[in-house]
Amino acid sequence: MREPYMTQILEETKRYEFRKYRMADTVKRAWFYRVTPISAITHVGEIAPSVTRRGDSVTVRKDNLENERLVLDIPAWKWGQYADEILTVYELETPITLHKLEEKDGFAGPPRGMVYLPDMIKQDVDWENQKKVGSLWAQRTWN
């Protein structure tokens, strides 16, 4: 995840991630790998199933300015046909570094685009000890 996008997510001004492909509905969380100089997975976001724009309608909630813009003008749709709403964001107590991804989890370099996370990483993260960030995010809970 490049800047300024991760900062926008953390500041709650970016609530949707746009993609050219639909993620499987079984995908419940996005693990955010931050590029150099951080080079680590630092945050995890719970996401809603993808929505798509069909003709002039789109099924996104109109509960804030960004959602209104999505429904009315949708300049962000140029980045992709599918939108994934970010429901919650957690900061990892211990970031998962590129070194760890390469040495322990078999990555051959930094993740690029969407990559399915190995089960080993998910098992290493104790969700009870992660910090929910942001005021809107703090009102939501893991399911």
Image (cartoon, rainbow, N blue to C red):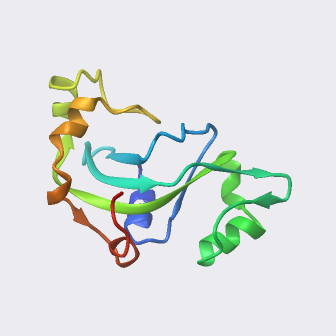
State the image quarter where residue 119 is shown. Answer: top left
Q: Is residue 50 left or right of residue 54?
A: left
Q: Is residue 105 left or right of residue 137?
A: left
Identity of the residue drawn at 38% across and 55% down: 45
Identity of the residue drawn at 45% across and 58% down: 5
Q: Is residue 29 left or right of residue 123?
A: right
In the rendered image of this protein, does residue 9 appear above or below residue 104? below
Quadrant in the picture for the C terminus: bottom left
Identity of the residue drawn at 55% across and 39% down: 23
In the rendered image of this protein, does residue 45 appear above or below residue 14? above
Q: Nearer the viewer, residue 127 or 83?
A: 127
Count of residue discs = 0
In the rendered image of this protein, does residue 117 appear above or below residue 96? above
Residue 127 rendering spot, x and y as whole percentages: 20, 53
Q: Residue furthest front?
A: 143
State the image quarter where residue 138 is shown. Answer: bottom left
Q: Nearer the viewer, residue 63 or 108?
A: 63
Q: Residue furthest right?
A: 55
Residue 34 rendering spot, x and y as whole percentages: 32, 47
State the image quarter where residue 112 is shown. Answer: top left
Residue 100 rendering spot, x and y as whole percentages: 16, 32
